[in-house]
Image (cartoon, rainbow, N blue to C red):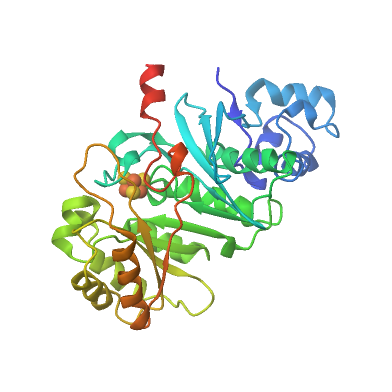
């Protein structure tokens, strides 16, 4: 029988377990501290819980932590981690150090249903949602490894790895709850950013139930073209997403950004910059231009850096704060849009 992971459970859920096992009430709090603050990987390490209770707990439960099965390091210091999930699938996680900051790009699904034309994960297809334990394991384990190697501990989390996080909203939300809870990492939600193509229903929940930053994968300001490259546009047109976003107050340090990958001759001319300005209207936001990384199976090509900076300058002059994302970890296939565990899944079958 597979054991149930404790990682990802709230205090109330842990209390249900300790009640079921007839353990004292305070044991749930002790378990919580061992998992979320003292970072244990085995139930046996919970030394202030009696041996008999640890054994009883271990019969049906485990902590839910696992080590990566591979780590690749880029010339620029970026690290790509390959994890095996509790379901026996594979996911990738990217650690991006930058002086005193270190950002972790976390996966939320195995593959992705959204099938964006320019994304390697989309081309992998969908192989399932990640459990909360599998999401948190990426964060807890990479942070532990970074600290052990004397690298920068995590300062920021971005839900921008494999998968559409709002398509696995409940588990993603639970992982955010634990990172921001006092019993967890007590992080400010401003250290967390979620990136989405814009799944309207769960986007509303995310906006109401969290205070994390939001990045919308926009890429194409015109409906027909966005539909051509991003099938999600059919169900969730970008104009509807912008109307929804306009109903929220963005003045309280909650950051809204739009991601715009630049494709040569497709969306990188001034005409598209004008359409983008029209679409965004007066919504307080920033635009993040992303150099495209060539992948197989698409005719899309990267825009030149000159085109990208011209586009950036056009938006900046018209009052839109625009940045160009630095490509990190390209040599180990860790940069935006390049994550794929298709090969590992095939080898496994
Ligand atoms: S860009 Fe994001 S939403 Fe689109 S296929 Fe890739 S992982 Fe999925």
Image quarter hosting the N terminus: top right
Q: What's the residue at 28%, 60% (across, down)? A: 219
The picture places residue 216, in percent across and down from the top left corner, at: 37, 61
Inspect this view and state whether residue 125 appears: no
- Does residue 284 lie above or below 186 as drawn? below
The picture places residue 292, in percent across and down from the top left corner, at: 33, 52
The picture places residue 291, in percent across and down from the top left corner, at: 35, 55
- Does residue 242 lie above or below 237 as drawn? below
Left/right placement of residue 100 relative to residue 196 reads: right
In this view of the protein, which residue sits in the foreground, 43 or 189? 189
In the rendered picture of this protein, how many numbered marks are placed on residues? 0
Q: Quadrant of residue 306?
A: bottom left
Considering every residue shown, the one lying at the far left of the view is 224
In this view of the protein, which residue sits in the foreground, 94 or 313? 313
In this view of the protein, which residue sits in the foreground, 86 or 156? 156
In this view of the protein, which residue sits in the foreground, 176 or 147? 147
């Amino acid at each position: 029988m597979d054991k149930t992971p404790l990682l990802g459970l709230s205090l109330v859920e842990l209390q249900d377990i300790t009640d079921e096992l007839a353990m004292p009430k305070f044991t749930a709090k002790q378990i919580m501290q061992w998992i979320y603050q003292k970072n244990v990987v085995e139930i046996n390490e919970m030394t202030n819980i009696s041996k008999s209770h640890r054994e009883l707990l271990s019969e049906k439960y485990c902590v839910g932590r696992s080590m990566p099965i591979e780590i690749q390091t880029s010339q620029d210091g970026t690290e790509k981690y390959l994890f095996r999930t509790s379901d026996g699938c594979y996911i990738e996680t990217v650690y991006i150090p930058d002086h005193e900051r270190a950002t972790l790009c976390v996966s939320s699904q195995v593959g992705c249903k959204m099938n964006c034309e320019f994304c390697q994960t989309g081309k992998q297809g969908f192989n399932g949602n990640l459990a909360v334990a599998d999401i948190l394991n990426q964060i807890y384990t990479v942070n532990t490894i970074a600290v052990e190697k004397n690298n920068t501990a995590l300062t920021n989390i971005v839900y921008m790895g494999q998968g559409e996080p709002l398509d696995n909203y409940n588990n993603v939300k639970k992982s955010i709850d634990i990172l921001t809870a006092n019993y967890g990492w007590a992080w400010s939600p401003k250290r967390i950013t979620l990136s989405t193509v814009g799944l309207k229903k769960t986007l509303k929940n995310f906006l109401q139930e969290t205070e994390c930053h939001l990045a919308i994968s926009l890429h194409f300001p015109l409906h027909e073209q966005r539909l051509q490259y991003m099938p999600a546009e059919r169900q969730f047109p970008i104009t509807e997403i912008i109307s929804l976003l306009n109903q929220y107050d963005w003045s309280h340090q909650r950051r809204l950004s739009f991601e715009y990958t630049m494709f040569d001759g497709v969306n990188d001319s001034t005409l598209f910059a004008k359409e983008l300005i029209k679409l965004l209207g007066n919504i307080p936001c920033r635009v993040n231009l992303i150099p495209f990384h060539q992948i197989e199976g698409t005719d899309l090509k990267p825009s030149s850096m000159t085109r990208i900076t011209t586009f950036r300058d056009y938006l900046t002059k018209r009052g839109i704060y625009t940045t160009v994302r630095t490509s990190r970890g390209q040599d180990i296939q860790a940069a935006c849009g390049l994550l794929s565990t298709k090969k590992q899944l095939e080898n496994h079958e």
